[in-house]
Image (cartoon, rainbow, N blue to C red):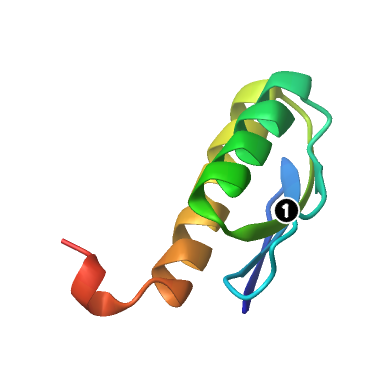
Amino acid sequence: MTTIRRETRETSVNVSVRTDLATDGAIETGEPFLDHMLGTLARYSGLHLAIEATGDLRHHLIEDVAISLGLALRDVIPERCAR
């Protein structure tokens, strides 16, 4: 499991990724479509994602969630799988 916390002037993001749970986790960003897409990613990848995020603008929120999720995935996916 890995947890990434990102705090900026615009956003607050917490992302936890686990590979050992069969549940989708809890995703709350305040953006319904982003929540849906992250839930779909969790479901089809077999990852447990717990994401909590707030932000001032949709653009900042999505950007910082993506940065945080990328850092978390880099930590849980074996190096040999990465390009």
* Residue 3 seen in render: yes
Q: Position of residue 15 (x, y in %)?
A: 68, 60
Residue at image point 23% right, 65% down: 82
Observer-nearest of 70 and 35? 35
**Where on the picture, by quarter, is residue 40?**
top right
**Where on the picture, by quarter, is residue 62?**
top right
Name the amino acid, label 1: Val
Q: In which quarter of the image is the C terminus?
A: bottom left
Which structural element holds mark 1?
strand
Q: Where is residue 80 in the image (x, y as percent from the top left)?
A: 20, 76
Observer-nearest of 80 and 67? 80
Position of 43 with respect to 76 (left or right) is right
Residue at image point 77% right, 24% down: 31
Few, some or many residues within 10 Å of mark 1 (<14, 14–19, 20+): many
Residue at image point 79% right, 37% down: 29
Rendered view: 18 above or below 47: below
Q: Quadrant of the N terminus?
A: bottom right
For disc 1, the marked residue is 13
Q: Where is residue 18 in the image (x, y as percent from the top left)?
A: 62, 71
Question: What number of labels is visible?
Answer: 1
Rendered view: 78 above or below 25: below
Residue at image point 33% right, 77% down: 78
Q: Position of residue 69 (x, y in %)?
A: 54, 54
Position of 74 with respect to 17 (left or right) is left
Rendered view: 20 above or below 11: below
